[in-house]
Amino acid sequence: MRYLCFFILFLFVSISTAAASVLPPIAVDIPKSEFLKWEHEFKSQEKVINSLLEDANLPIGESHYLNRLIFEASPYLLRHSVNPIDWQSWRDEVFTEAKNNKQLIFLSIGYSTCHWCHVMEKESFIDTDIANTLNSSFISIKVDRELNPEIDQYFTHALELIKGSAGWPITAVLTPKGEPIWLESYVSKSKLNKILKRLNTIWTKRPQSLEQVAKNITSQLSNNHIAEAKLWDKETPTLKFNELIKSIDNINGGLIGGPKFPSASLIELLLYQYQSSPNEALKTKIELSLNSLMNKGIRDHINGGFYRYATDGIWMKPHFEKMLYNQALLISTFSKAYLVFNNERYKAVVVDTINFVNNFLKSSAGGYYSAIDADYKGLEGRYYLYSDEELSSIAKGPLNLFEWYDFNDTGLKFPYVESQSDKTLEVKKSILALKSKLSFPHIDKKVLTSWNALMVSAYLDAYKSFGKAEHLKAAISLSKYLLTQHYSTDALSRARFMDKLAGKAMLDDYAYLSSAMLKLYLVTSEVQWLNSAINLYRSGSRLFAKDYSGNQVQLNNQLDDGELISAHAVLTDVGIKLNDLGVKVHYKELVYQFKQGFINNSKNDFFSNEILLKEKYGTFDNMQFFARGNGKVSFELVDKKVYLKFKMKPGWHVNSNVPNQKFLIATKVNYAENLINNIEYPKAINKKLGFSQSTLSLFEDDFEIKIELDNVNPLGELIEVNLQACSDKVCLLPEKLKFFISGD
């Protein structure tokens, strides 16, 4: 009996302790039944939340406050779920509540690996005075920019308009309708407290004055100069490219000035133009950018991968965040650069970056996590920096094989090296061992659909460049994961976190995944991937029409690549390619709006420029389709021998190199003088077809043209194949396929 009483007393104390471990937001009346649901969810997520707090160097094991963000599938939002602020997510119901209560809205936009977001949380969002002010007078909304990019984009544009620049966190006060009154980035606690109280006082006494401010800002956002529709000029892409060249930094690479972001789409545009018109000056610009990314501090030469951007203008001083999209885009870029320049060091960068992604960002479920935090134990970049004391166990001779960059006069430094060798790899292992017993920086384990789709494309670009089956296998595996775990009954989700789907898919999810599925079809010829590409494209097109069609200002902004690639441009590219394959899709209106946006946009529309240059000059891919998708050719260069490997669907053919009838168009290889020593065409098939009484000389099914090169110009040369494809019922227009031979 005594033991039973003791057990009951222990159980009562345990329940009481558990109940006391979390508290409702300050100065907010939450129904007990509702709060019990929050508490139950908190208990199921407690280990995850404690891990997030530990990574952010926030208190653990103490009493927590609790708010509605506890139900969100986002590490960023979950960490804020234990703030004393009555945070809510961005939902229509929140704005209805604000209108009914005539309350201002406090908006905070950030993301899990954002340094100044951490700072503001520690200073303001765990502060009870700030919480009391917000909870008593405002409705507070917290947004993860990676889950809601369209919200982030709108308020980023608003902040740029008002302040001239933007960064994260984005801090704003809105009217109950959601119109911005005041916007800032990071704000100190004292300044925030003053602004909140002042705006609330004005709202209480003279709400019409703040409504007028909001009206003025909203008017500027929606009524920026709207250009009238212009006639398309085919020379516009070339003129824009010539203007862009003037913005290239000829000393450091990339665009002039700093901070510097590793713009993959910029380099790929330059690579395309180089293939179209090889010249030494353009080659120098491209290699300067690639070599800066490869050799300078923007790349982690020890752990692998690239940092998000360099805070200086010479690529040396990184902001130490690592983002999945950066890795994916740069894997693609260096893979394509290898095809053009045949530089083995570019291949090494691809291999190293893929290894990093698999070692640090791959989830056990099959997707890839979104980002790694810059902060470590309260200091930016500390995990990647070394003190002399930490390095004392390694002899100076081996350490001097690396260059060392002193970071911010902290007494800390990091290594970089222009060329890896067996010796530097050994030293690298020793340097890695110094951190082996430390916990790794916080990883945002949110698996984003769009960024993982970029990773699919990255694997495919690596496969096309190096021919390694493991890269194709990885692309297929990741594609299957996305289509089964993020896509069901034609509904695509934005992300997955802790076995929960999070948010509706955005335009970039549909565009990037559709593009990846189309690339996978082009490589494998498996129709399942084509069907997925078509379905995703159609869903993305409907979303685009709903959100952007008719709003030329937004359309113009949609073409800016920024750190990523314009989803509008990617979706347009998919539509064009599907049409070229003979798939009936509505794409002409999208292309028209795309071209209008390109004419009017003055920003970084690099990928858009590449798409439109391809319309004029064609493509130079080493895998190309022809005959509206019924024929495929792969280009391989091995020891100065070119192999053009053709695959044609049953019932389709091209004329041989020597047709039996003079009026028929021969399959012929064209090339520059002194480029080719010998061409070996396959043996033709002679047969009669239903539409012809004469015997025809044809190539069909699988066949190969072998070309022996005499001399390869270091600047690269083009090989063209002229052909005309026919079936038993129809002959298509003649086509010209172009292939670029990489330089020495």
Image (spheres, rainbow, N blue to C red):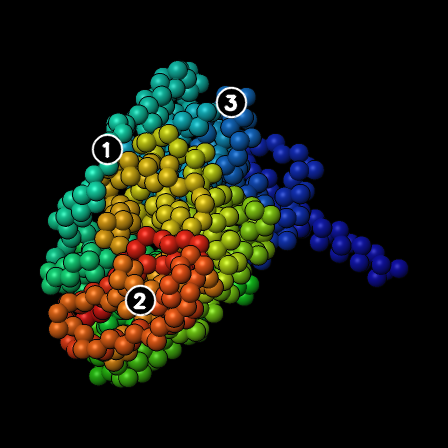
Which residue lies under the disc numbered 1?
A: 231
* Residue at 14% across, 54% down: 249
Q: Residue at x 48, y 44 (%)?
A: 538
Q: Is residue 425 depicted above or below 364 in this figure?
A: below
**Amino acid tagged 3:** Lys
Please provide percent x and percent y for residue 22. 61, 46
User: Residue at 23% of width from left, 49% of height from top?
Assistant: 616
Q: On the image, numbered disc 2 is attached to which residue?
A: 660
Discs 3/2, front: 2
Q: What residue do we see at 31% from left, 32% from top?
A: 553
Q: Which dot, 3 or 1, sits closer to the camera? A: 1
Give the residue at mark 3.
99
Quarter of the image that includes the C terminus: bottom left
Q: Does residue 218 sit above or below 564 in this rendering?
A: above
Quadrant in which the N terminus appears: bottom right
* 566 vs 703, nearest the viewer: 703
Disc 2 is placed on an element classified as loop
Please indicate, yes or no, whether residue 50 appears anywhere in the rendered image. no
Going by the numbered disc 2, the residue's amino acid type is Asn
